[in-house]
Amino acid sequence: MATEWKGKSRGTVLGYKIFVFCMKNLGLGSAYFVLNFVATYFVFFALDGSKAIYYYFHKRLGYSKFKSLISIFKSYYVFGQTIIDKVAISSGLREKFTYEFDGMHLIEETLRAKKGGVLISAHVGNFEIAEHFFGDLEEDASISLLTTDVEHSAIKDYLESVTKKSNINFILIQEDLSHIFEINAALARNEIVCMTGDRYIENSKFLEHELLGKKAKFPAGPFLLASRLNVPVLFVYVMKETNTHYHLYTRKSHTKHRDALGLLEEYTQSVTWMLKKYPLQWFNYFDFWCANKDLKN
C-alpha cells in the first residue's frame, strides 16, 4: 500500500481525450459507460489504491469483506464520474446538471463583511466544481486556491485546451513561505481563499487527530494559517448525489482565534459527517491512516 500521498494523482492525457471525445460526440452517458472498464482496470492494476480504499471501507466504516470489495469498484467509478463531470461543466455543459445549496448564505455573509474568508475542504466529493456554484452568489466572489501545483503538466495543458478558462487565481505554496503574503493580499481584496486539509506530505509539519475512529496525520499549514488570519473560516464540500445533481454544503467554524487543534477537530467532525452520508466519495487512495499492520488482521 502506498504509505503516503505522493503529491499528484494518476491519469494520462489519452484517458482524458477518450472521455472528452465520448462526452462531446456521444453524450455524457457514453463517457460513464466507458468508465466501467476504466474503474475495473484500476481495481486490479492500481493495487496500492485498492488496498487503501478497502481498508477505509472494511476497517474504518465497518463494512463486511464482500461489501468492501464491491465498494472498491464503486469508489473508482464515482471518482471517475466526478472527473468527467468537472470537464463537462467546465466545457460548457453546466446546464446538463442541477445544483442544490445548503449554507450558501454563510459565504454571502462572509463576503458582505469585506474581510475575505477561508474555505477548507477535502478530497471528498467534487470540490473542484465549487467555482461554478459561486457564480450564483448575490455578492461577487473572487477565488484564490492554495495549491502545490504538482499535477502532470501535460494533462493540465490538455484540459485547458478543451475547457473554459477558470476564474480561479492559484497561489502556489512556496518553501520561503511567500505564499502567506499572497494570501493576506487576497483577503484584503475580500477574496475567498480555498485550501484542502486532508493530504499530509511526508516530512512536512503535521497535526494529528482522530478520523473515523483512528488517528491520522493532517497538514499543519491550513489549520495554523486559518486559525491565525482572524477572518471567517468555512468548511465547504460539493457532493455528487445523482448522475446530474450536485449538493453544496457550507458550515462555519466557531473555533477561537489561534486554536489550530480546535479548528482541526471541527474539520474532522465535518468530514466524518460527510463520509457517513456519502461513503463512496472519499477519494484519498493512499494509506491515509498509516494502517499497514491493520490490513494483516
Image (tube, helix red, strand yellow):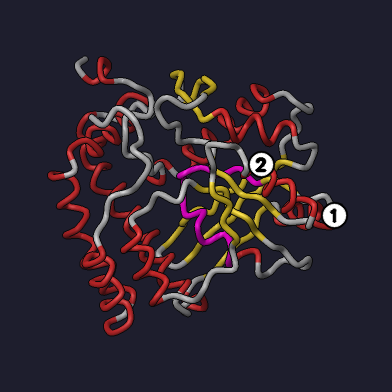
Q: Nearer the viewer, residue 228 or 239?
A: 228
Residue sitting farthest toward the front: 176
Magenta residues (range)? 119-132
Estimate the spatial distance between the alpha carbons at disc 1 and disc 2, rounded to whole Å.
19 Å
Q: Earlier in the sequence, mark 1 or mark 2?
A: 1
Amino acid at dot 1? Lys
Residue 223, above or below 290 = below
Residue 15 locus on image (x, y percent): 23, 65
Residue 2 percent location from the top left of the image:
26, 31
Q: Where's residue 187, x and y in %?
A: 75, 50
The crowding category of the residue bearing disc 1, from other C-alpha atoms within 10 Å (few below 14, some 14 to 19, many at least 20), is some
- Residue at 37% from the left image edge and 29% from the top image edge: 288
Q: In the displayed structure, does residue 32 sit left or right of residue 181? A: left
Q: Is residue 203 above or below residue 286?
A: above
Q: Which mark is residue 114?
A: 1
> In the shown orientation, is residue 199 left or right of residue 53?
right
Q: Nearer the viewer, residue 230 or 112?
A: 230
Q: Which residue is mark 2?
A: 180
Which residue appears at 33% of the width and 63% of the height? 155
> In the picture provided, is 224 more to the left or to the right than 57?
right
Under circle 1, the secondary element is loop
